[in-house]
């Protein structure tokens, strides 16, 4: 990865931040996008202090012009793009029947359309390098998660988009990876949207029992190196994906039971 140019969205926290340090530590030139200019500045300074090369652009991936600007920043600073990691994402927690539809729209704008915009503008440059387009999805992109209709829908859509792009460029040397982490310790549940679009606040799950963002970043890094098409992370995640393939009805009942146990679960 030395001297490869890597764009990472959602780079101010969680998996995105961990990916920034993982790639920079391996000698890659990182271009970071996130909404928080302050956090991006702090991360960039830390990478520079460790001898890494980094650029950043304040980016709301739901805004097409922001995504275009992020790609332009990479080209202006480093003159090429080898890897795009579509990591920016938000979650939600509410039953569909109780949901204000603006919540699903917001999730689709960030999780799906953010991937569309960034990939559309970066793809011509990545194709020249026979590089990689990556989507950080979720187990929620394999199995529909109750109380997370907007989240699962957006992640299923992301997977479908990237599968199509992979097939369209089968003979062009393009590598496309869709990563499906299980529950990961990050702030995505703290910032998840409630039924009315407000932030949920406290996470309903025990973050201590989850895979760390740093570990997820290491797995994604290796999967890009090996040009894998998909990876499913955590033992629980792999088991859910496997059982859902062969026993979908039984799996739905288990997922229901699991989510019903959450603190203040909307599922009764």
Image (tube, rainbow, N blue to C red):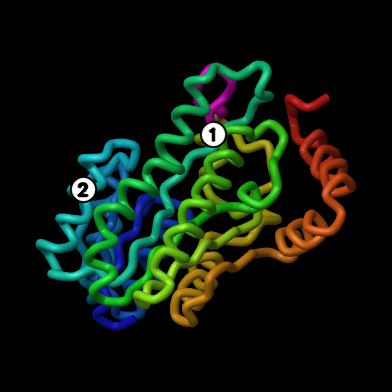
**Range of the magenta residues?**
193-200
x and y, in percent, of residue 265 in the image: 74, 28
Residue at image mark 1: 192
Q: What's the residue at 58%, 47% (across, down)?
A: 156
Judge from the rendering whether residue 103 lies leftward or rightward of residue 40; answer left or right: right
Q: Label 1's element? A: loop
Residue 241 in percent (x, y) is at 73, 59
Dot 2: within a 10 Å radius of its alpha carbon, few (fewer than 14), some, or many (20 or more) residues? some
- Specify the principal SS of the magenta part: loop
* Quadrant, the N terminus: bottom left
Q: Which residue is mark 2?
A: 68
Q: Residue at x 49, y 82 (%)?
A: 226
The span from disc 2 to disc 1 (Cα, nearest Å) is 26 Å
Q: Secondary structure at mark 2?
A: helix
Mark 2–mark 1 CB contact (< 8 Å): no
Instruction: Establish if 223 lies above or below 267.
Output: below
Q: Nearer the viewer, residue 202 or 126?
A: 126
25 to 148, vertically: above or below: below
**Which is nearer the N-term, disc 2 or disc 1?**
2
Identity of the residue drawn at 87% across and 41% down: 253
Place of residue 22 in the rendered image (x, y in percent of width and height, measured from the top left): 40, 71
User: Where 153 sits versus 211, above or below?
Assistant: above
Magenta segment includes 194: yes
**Residue 151 highlighted magenta (yes or no):** no
Percent x, y for residue 23? 36, 72
């Amino acid at each position: 990865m030395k001297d490869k140019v890597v764009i990472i969205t959602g780079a101010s926290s969680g998996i995105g931040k961990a990916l920034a340090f993982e790639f920079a530590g391996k000698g890659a030139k990182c271009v970071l996008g996130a909404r928080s200019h302050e956090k991006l500045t702090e991360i960039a300074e830390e990478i520079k202090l460790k001898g890494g090369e980094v650029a950043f652009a304040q980016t709301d991936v739901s805004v097409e012009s922001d995504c275009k600007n992020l790609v332009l920043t990479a080209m202006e600073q480093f003159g090429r793009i080898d890897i795009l990691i579509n990591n920016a994402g938000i979650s939600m927690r509410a039953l569909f029947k109780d949901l204000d539809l603006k919540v699903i729209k917001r999730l689709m704008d960030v999780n799906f359309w953010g991937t569309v915009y960034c990939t559309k503008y970066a793809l011509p440059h990545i194709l020249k390098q026979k590089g990689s387009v990556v989507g950080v999805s979720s187990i929620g992109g394999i199995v529909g998660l109750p109380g997370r209709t907007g989240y699962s829908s957006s992640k299923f859509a992301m997977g479908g988009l990237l599968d199509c792009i992979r097939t369209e460029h089968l003979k062009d040397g393009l590598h496309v990876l869709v990563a499906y982490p299980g529950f990961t310790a990050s702030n995505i549940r703290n910032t998840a949207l409630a039924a009315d679009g407000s932030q949920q606040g406290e996470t309903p799950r025990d973050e201590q029992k989850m895979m760390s963002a740093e570990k997820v970043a290491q797995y994604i890094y290796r999967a890009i190196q090996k040009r894998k098409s998909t990876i499913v992370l955590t033992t629980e995640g792999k088991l859910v994906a496997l059982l859902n393939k062969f026993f979908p009805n039984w799996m739905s009942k288990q997922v229901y039971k699991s989510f019903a146990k959450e603190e203040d679960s909307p599922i009764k």
